[in-house]
């Protein structure tokens, strides 16, 4: 059987695309593993009617609902290892092979595989504190932790103007905000950093240039937060740390197999090149939606992108069927 669409990924973007194509009565195969970027998160925010819901519960319920409502939608728990074009630009077709050896074919291919965070594991203890004590989205995690006694730490590594904005945003949740630059020792480096952070310093943000030797999460009985152990033996406590991870598409290897371009975005990481909001790529019939192709990462925008891509795919299939 050749499916109308193969959707790789069953997160918010892939499921939204599957749901829309299911309502259009198209035959769709969704292939996804069980490893999600937000698997360690405890609650979703910014999704209407789902405030505080566990993200994995959200995905599980969504998958069950879609497969129950739309008989033309099939969900396979597997991982795609190979993807190839087998059609023409005028009549696209694709073949994928999974880790279990299964081979599937489809007229359209939607990459909704999400993104992978690149953590600075050269900082001892970072992974232990992530993501329960280190957050990258203040809209997601700042509100519930506002006005706590030890303040917010901003880990500015590598140093960039983006952390000035993060420090200013952190000030909306706590009057005490410390930016940790992790080892700027020369006077010249420190002066340049003070110029960069001048808007934040004017609002009471402080800079800490001493290198970090390790991060340590607080014991559960002492509440949320972390100890930041600095070189020289000094230790500081914060209620939470803010850090902007670099991300890369989880399906970067498949994108390269298909001949797609991967764009490097300084300060953000990389994304699969596509046109927003259609998700169209340089290869006819291949589309990208969600975190894999967008700098705006989150459940709500991923769902919106999935719906847009599904609508474009549906229209393209109808046009192709006319000829």
Image (spheres, helix red, strand yellow):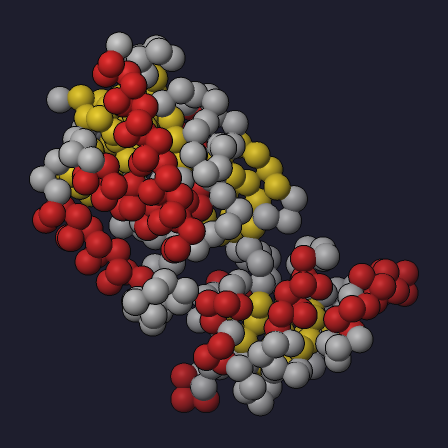
Q: Is residue 188 above or below residue 301?
A: below
Look at 49% across and 77% down and name the residue there.
143
Q: How many marks?
A: 0
Q: Residue 81: in sight, yes or no?
A: no
Please state which of residues 24 and 122 is positioned toward the viewer in this rendering: 24
Where is residue 189 shown, x and y percent of the image?
85, 60
In this image, 191 relative to 270: left or right?
right
Q: Is residue 46 left or right of residue 315?
A: right
Task: Identify whether 178 is placed above or below 193.
Answer: below
Horizontal side of residue 46 vs 209, given as left or right: left
Q: Residue at x 10, y 49 (%)?
A: 68
In the image, residue 166 above or below residue 94: below
Q: Does residue 40 sit above or below 226 in this rendering?
A: above
Residue 130 pos. (x, y %)? 47, 65
Residue found 36% across the figure and 23% down from its top: 285
Furthest-right residue in this view? 188
Front residue (pair 98, 278): 278
Quarter of the picture holding the C terminus? top left
> Which quadrant, please, contains the N terminus?
top left
Residue 184 vs residue 63, the one in the foreground: 63
- Residue 253 in picture, x, y percent from top left: 43, 31
What residue is rendered at 19% in x and 40% in y?
23
Q: Position of residue 7 (x, y in %)?
A: 28, 35
The image quadrant of residue 319 is: top left
- Residue 189 visible in the current orientation: yes
């Amino acid at each position: 059987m050749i499916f109308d669409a193969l959707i790789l990924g069953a997160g918010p973007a892939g499921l939204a695309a599957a749901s829309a194509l299911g309502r259009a009565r198209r035959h769709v195969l969704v292939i996804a593993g069980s490893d999600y970027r937000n698997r360690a998160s405890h609650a979703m925010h910014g999704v209407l009617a789902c405030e505080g819901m566990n993200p994995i519960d959200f995905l599980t319920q969504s998958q069950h609902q879609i497969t129950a409502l739309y008989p033309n939608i099939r969900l396979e728990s597997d991982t795609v290892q190979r993807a190839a074009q087998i059609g023409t630009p005028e009549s696209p077709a694709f073949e994928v092979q999974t880790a279990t050896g299964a081979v599937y074919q489809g007229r359209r291919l939607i990459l909704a595989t999400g993104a992978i965070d690149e953590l600075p594991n050269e900082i001892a203890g970072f992974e232990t504190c992530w993501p329960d004590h280190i957050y990258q989205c203040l809209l997601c995690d700042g509100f519930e932790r506002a006005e706590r006694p030890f303040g917010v730490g901003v880990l500015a590594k590598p140093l960039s103007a983006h952390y000035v904005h993060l420090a200013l945003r952190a000030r909306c949740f706590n009057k005490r905000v410390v930016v940790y630059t992790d080892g700027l020792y020369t006077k010249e480096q420190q002066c340049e950093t003070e110029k960069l952070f001048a808007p934040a310093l004017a609002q009471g943000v402080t800079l800490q240039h001493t290198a970090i030797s390790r991060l340590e999460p607080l014991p559960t009985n002492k509440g949320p937060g972390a100890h930041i152990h600095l070189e020289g033996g000094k230790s500081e406590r914060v209620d939470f740390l803010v850090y902007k991870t670099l991300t890369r598409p989880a399906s970067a290897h498949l994108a390269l197999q298909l001949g797609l371009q991967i764009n490097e975005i300084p300060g953000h990481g990389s994304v699969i090149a596509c046109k927003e909001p259609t998700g169209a790529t340089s290869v006819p019939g291949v589309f990208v939606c969600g975190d894999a192709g967008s700098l705006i990462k989150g459940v709500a925008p991923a769902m919106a992108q999935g719906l847009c891509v599904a609508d474009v795919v549906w229209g393209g299939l109808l046009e192709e069927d006319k000829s």
